[in-house]
Each structure stands twice: as structure tokens, then as C-alpha cells.
Image (spheres, coloured by chain):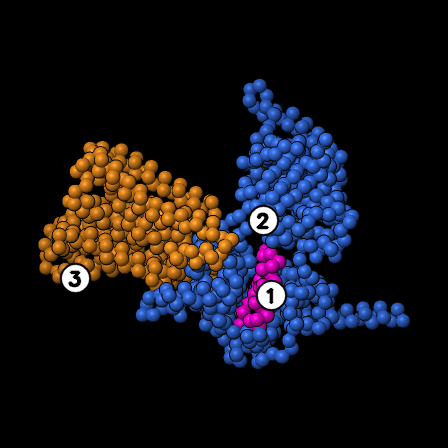
Amino acid sequence: MSANIENIKQNPLNDKQLLKGRSKNVMQKYGILLVLLFLCVLMWILTPHFLTVTNLVNIVRQMSTIGIIAIGVTPIIITKGIDLSSGSLVALVSVIVASFAQGNYPLLIPILMAVVVGVAVGLINGTIIAKGLLAPFIATLGMMTAARGAAMLYSDGRPIGGLSESFKFIGQGTILGIPVPVIIFALVGVATWIILNKTKIGKYIYAIGGNEHAAVTAGINVKKVLILVYAYAGLLAGLAGMTLTSRIASGQPQSGLMFELDAIAATVIGGTSLFGGIGTIGGTIIGALIIGVVNNGLDLMGVSSYWQQIVKGAIIVAAVYVDSRKNRTK
Amino acid sequence: MENNYILEMENITKEFPGVKALDNVQLKVRKGTVHALMGENGAGKSTLMKIIIGMYTPDKGRMIFDGTEIKLTNIHDGLDRGISMIHQELSPIPEMTVAENIFLGREPTTFGGFIDRKKLTSMTLDLLKSIGINIDPNLKMKELSIANTQMIEIAKAISFNSKLVIMDEPTSAITEKEVAQLFRVIKSLKEKNVGIIYITHKMSELYEIADDISVFRDGKYIGTERAEKLNKEDLIKMMVGRELTQLFHKPKSKFGDVVLSVQNLSANGHFQDVSFEVRKGEILGFAGLMGSGRTEILEAIFGLRNPDQGEIHIHGKRVNIKSPQDAVKNHLGFLTEDRKLSGLFLPLGVGDNMITVHIDNYVTKGFLNKNRIKSDCLKKKEQLLIKTPSLEQAVANLSGGNQQKVLLARWLLKNPDILFLDEPTRGIDVGAKSEFYDLIFDLANQGKAIIVVSSEMVEILGLCDRIAVMHEGHLAGELTRKEATQELIMHLATGHSLDELDNKLEVMESILT
């Protein structure tokens, strides 16, 4: 409060603006959280079972796969890019990891494979985009198709089962009562938040999205940053694929269908602007949870999954509309 | 009593976040007259026009149009009441015909709801004839010259039976002959008792066409005078608020060692064989016409463009700059020409915009030290007098002058030895300009070597210790502060050599004596 008053004293002409700006910021900052809380209360009223610890934990666990991917996609979208390949990458990682999680391999091997495959695909995306060969949309669209094909090829189009118990722990186990996927989701979220807010590369990511041309002129190595950003998204998609494979206890070449769009939806609902330069990890996590709460609540109410898709679609459109309005008023 | 005024704007105030665009201004336009609006960029003219046509709503103030107080909420509202505007940037639909463009959205229709082409053509012909323009209504807009496009825009503005027409620099794209035609149109409008608000930067046409002149400066109303009672000198004083020469300091003449030396630098198609030096504490100016290669030279030195040949030495050592990263490492800084295109990160905050170049300095063990960032940014904010409510304010909400200061702060945090300033005061108001000039002189006194590219003669002449003049990619000549005059610079910039001028002077002298 005292800081506020000081500010007003320093800028007597602008105090009104300052306050106006503050209240607008509050809405922008916490608006999406209020939406989540509102949805939770709504679901609680409609279906009392919604607000149980088991169910809430369940929602977060269900959303963790999409959530992890979305956390990787957020920095990409902040740079004004897009990644359509993450769903297919989940499938490719799934079948490769599964083949290394059978029998006597130590647990480290499948984990390492998930990281290697994810980062490799991300590096290819990032390199093509950073060199300016193709626009992010096209580059990752191609990768989406190719990675899916590679997953089919690797597994002969069949699921890979017989995974070791130790590997299944990643998707099915709990630590202190918390499901492991939720822990991974949380760790990835914290790590990415630190990268975006506390490091140089984080500032660069926002700068590139804000104005790539200016970023070049300011001496930022834009290519390097873009390659890293896409590689990081690949890494997280790899981790998501690994977690999913462990949870369903089989490598599925058909898994991860449409995941890239759910991840983008979570990111955009969470306030990340497709125009670049704006976005937060907290927003993306809340965006993922909103999708989760809506799915779960409608499930509990016995609403058909077809209707669920329509509701989800409406939420995405509404979120992007709000985003474009925000940009227009500038 | 019949009201003499078509428009009376009273006590208009309009604020944008962080900027007071208009501060309690007024404007009274008489019927059947041309009212010229003068003021530097950022004086608030365009904001006031946008309020008059209904694009913006004022925070405070009254608008009286044709004797009744009105409140406009959108442009259509304004058009319906008879207020139209010819914008500086033309926006025709190139694939449609002249007639279709003029009556877009108001086409005459037949009973079936189809467009009545015959009537459309005849209406257009009548309209064009009434203002003495001879253009085929069925030509496509893309077939017209820029000047004729302008004429069609004017015809369109008139076609709304407007009682008030606003013209924003209508002559910026047309030839003298067409200007004469435009002035005839304006006279015929005056005879129809239409009021005209005319925005221009050209003094000569101002006195030819204007009845009244109002001057704005820094969002404030300065005054209104009958054109015949206001001479040029007084008008400039009203616009600028002080004599222009007061903006600049006394020059100094002692400089340090050569900091940057460029030899035989060429980039094919842009500039050839350019050599020059800048010393510690010296301000070197690059003058020349648009496209003469001034900006491209800076870009080539800075690693934004690959030179084909030539050498660059910094502090006496040959350097090989392949990218802006290399340039920054070699103590160069570059305030680029177009701050929105290649300078600002518009969605980001003021602080985040400042630290981009110097960010390495704030990293300890991989993490950013927010406290040091904040204190350094606040120091620069105070030092450069940047007006912003906070460091978190999106830089997009600042005025042009303050945005430019944020970009200068970005480079000053890094503290480069050599600073390139490309059109440093473009599009910023006169008050901010003078502050900016002070800053540039301070930097030179601190021992920075500075290169200024500017299209404003006054700026080049006032700021620079030495002036290099470019002509079509070649260095046409170099002038010292003492030698340089506006005429001499133009002489070189248009491709004449100094020898030629000397000869001419000798010839003239011999004739005179």
C-alpha cells in the first residue's frame, strides 16, 4: 500500500491511470484463476461428488499428460511459434520407451530413451524453424505426420505390452500418497516457471515473441534460443509420452491423438497470446486444470463425451476471443 | 442570431495510459472557411481529429456542431451528421471501380435489390463534375495515379454532403498541378459554406489556402489567429515554443583518439567504397536523401547486413563483425530508425525492454538478480526522465518520446563506446526532442563516439561536429560544423561536387565584379 502511495506521489498526473492499470492487471492476472474457481464451485453444486480429495487428485492426474506437454508448448507460443507435433511425438516415444521397458532393462534406460527421442525430434523442429526454412506451423505439421508414421513403423502398428513393474511405477505409483505423474507435472511446472522468470533465456523468449526483429538488433542469438525452446518442448512431450505409456502399461502407436491441440488449448485458455510476447506457466497450468475440471464434471454428470467436446470447443473460442480483444484495445 | 461557427470544441481533454494527449484544448471553425491546424508531431492534432470524427470519445469537454451540442460515439454517427475526413493514408479498394469506391455501402439499387449501375455511374459523374475532376467512374482504383486516388477520396468525403471536411496532409502525395486542382475544389466547398480543417506541414500552401490558423503544442492549445495577421516567424515560435537554435548547445572542438575507423566499406546495391572515422567525444552526422545508403552503412557495421568488402577498426584493432552479438561485444550500440519495427518489445514492460542488451551482467549462478535489475532500471528512468507509472507498464502505452528514451536506456545500460543513432527524434514531440539532444551532448561529453543519421537538417546541423553527406551510395563529401549549411548539404546530397560549387561561386563572383 505504501509503495502504491509513493508511486502516486511521484506521478501526480498519472495516479488515476495507475489505479486503473492496477485493477485491469488484477483481472488479467487472476481472471483465469477466478474462472477455474467458479467452475469448481459450479461443478460442486451440480455434482456433490466433485469436491472429494480422490476426485480432485484424479483430475490433476488425468490432466498431467496434457499439462506437461502444454508447459513445453507455452514458451514456444510465447515466441510466436506453434508445435503441432507433440501428440505424435507422444506416440513415437510411447512405442520406443515401451520396447525398452520390457524385461530386464534398468529403469534408467527407458527414461533416457524418452529424453533422447523427445529432444531429438524437438531439435529437428527447432533447427528447421530457427534457420528460417519453414514456418513453425508447417514444420511441426510435417513432423506431426512423420512422427506418427515412425511410431507405426517402429511398432508395426501394434501395441507393445509386457512392461516391467518398476517402469509402471512412473505412471501408476504414488509417493506420500501423491501420484507420480502429478509430481512430474508439478516439477516440470516449477522448472519451467523458473526458466521463464528467473533466467536470461526466459527474458529472451519473451523478447523474441514481442519483436523478433528487435531481438536480433539487440544482439540476442535468436536462432539458438528458438532451437532450445523447441528442443525443450520435445523433451517435455517425451516425458509426457513416457508417463502415459507407464500409466496405461503399454506402448501405443495410436496414443496422443489430438494431444497437441489440447495442449495448445490449455496454453491459450491460460492467457498465452498467439501474437507472442505474453504468457505464463501458472496460466497454462490453470488452463489445463480448467479443461480437466470441465471434462471431469461433465463426466460425473453423465453428459456424453460428444457434448463435452462441444463445451471444450466453446471455451477455447471464448479464450482466444478474449485474447484478441486484449490485443486490439492496445 | 445565426451561429457563425460550424464546429466549436471546448475544454477537450483526452488521456491515454501514461500520456495526456490533449489537455483542455479548444478549436472553433467558421463556416465556409479553411482552418489550418499546425503543430509538430505529437502535438495532439490527430487525436483531436479522431475525436471530431467520432473515433475517440473525449474524457472531458463539449463539442458543438452547427449550433447544437453533440456527442459522437462512432464514425458513422459523425458521417451522418456531416463530418467526414480524408485520411493521410489512403485506403481505396484497388479491384473496385471509382464509382463503387465512392458509394461503397450506399449504392443505389433497383427494385430487385441489385446495384443500379447506370445511376451509380451518373451519380459519380455529377459528383466529380461538381468539383471539376475529370475521371472515368468505371476505371478500377488500381489504375489511378496516387494523385487521382487522392482526388477520389476527396470526392468521397464530399459525397456525404458534409458540412465539415477534415483534410490530413492532403498534398503529401500529389504534384503542384494537382495541388492547384485541390485548391479549386476547396474553394468551391467554401462557396457551399462547408467548413474545412486542413492539416499540413507546408508553410507555402498554408498561406495560400488558410483563413484561420490554430497552433497546438504538446497536447495543449496555443492559439488561433487570422492567417493574414500571423507571419511565418511568429507561427514557428508558436509551434516550437522557443527558437530552434536554443535546442542545441555550444559545440566543442577537442576530441580524443579515433574509436571507429571504416575503410572502403561496400555492400553491393546499397553503398560503395565508404571510408570515415569517428573520434572519442565526437558526433558525426550522416546526411543525405532517403535511400542514399546512410542506414545501410550503420547496419553493415553492426552485423545486420553483410558488406562485400572493406575493413572496420575499433580502438585501432581490426574487427570482424558478423552479427549484432559481435557488434555488442565490440562496444557498439544501435538505436534503430523504426522503433516499433526493430526496437521495442511492445507487449513487454518498460524494465524488460531496458535490460535486453545488458542482461548478462545481471546473471549470478544462472539466475537473474531482480533487485539489481530494478535499481539500475530505476536509475536510468530517473536519469533520462522517462515518464512511466512503473517499470512493469507495457512499453506500448508510452508516448513516442518516452519509448525512444527506453530504447536509449537499453543501450546506455550496456554503456557502449560507439553509439549509432538512426533518426533519433523521429515522431517525438519538440519537448522530448530537446531533452534528447541534451542527452546526446552529454553522451558525447562523456567520451562516446556518436554517429547520427537524420533527415532533419536542423538536427544534423545543430548536433553534429562533422557531417558526412551521402549521395546514391557514395560518400559525396564531408563538412565540418563551421562549413556546413543547409544549402551545401543539399548540394552534395543531390549529386553535385564541392569543386563544382567553388567553380560556380568563382564564376558568379567574376560576373558580379
- Place of residue B188 in the rendered image (x, y in percent of width and height, measured from the top left): 75, 36
Residue situated in front as seen by the camera: B242 or A273: B242
* Corner quadrant of residue A322: top left
Verify CB contact (< 8 Å) between mark 1 and mark 3: no
For chain A, what colour was chosen?
Answer: orange
Magenta stretch encompasses residue B438: yes
How many C-alpha atoms fall within 10 Å of the one at disc 2: few (<14), some, or many (≥20)? some
* Relative height, residue A252 to residue B333 (above, below): above
- Residue type marked 1: Tyr
Real-space Cα separation, disc 2 to disc 3, in angstroms: 69 Å
- Inspect this view and state whether residue B228 appears: yes
Residue denoted by label 1: B437
Residue at (59% x, 23% y) in the render = B109
Residue denoted by label 2: B23
- Checking the image for residue A108, the label placed there is 3
- Residue type marked 2: Asp
Residue at (32% x, 68% y) in the render = B366
- Place of residue A232 in the rendered image (x, y in percent of width and height, measured from the top left): 30, 58
* Relative height, residue B211 to residue A97 (above, below): above
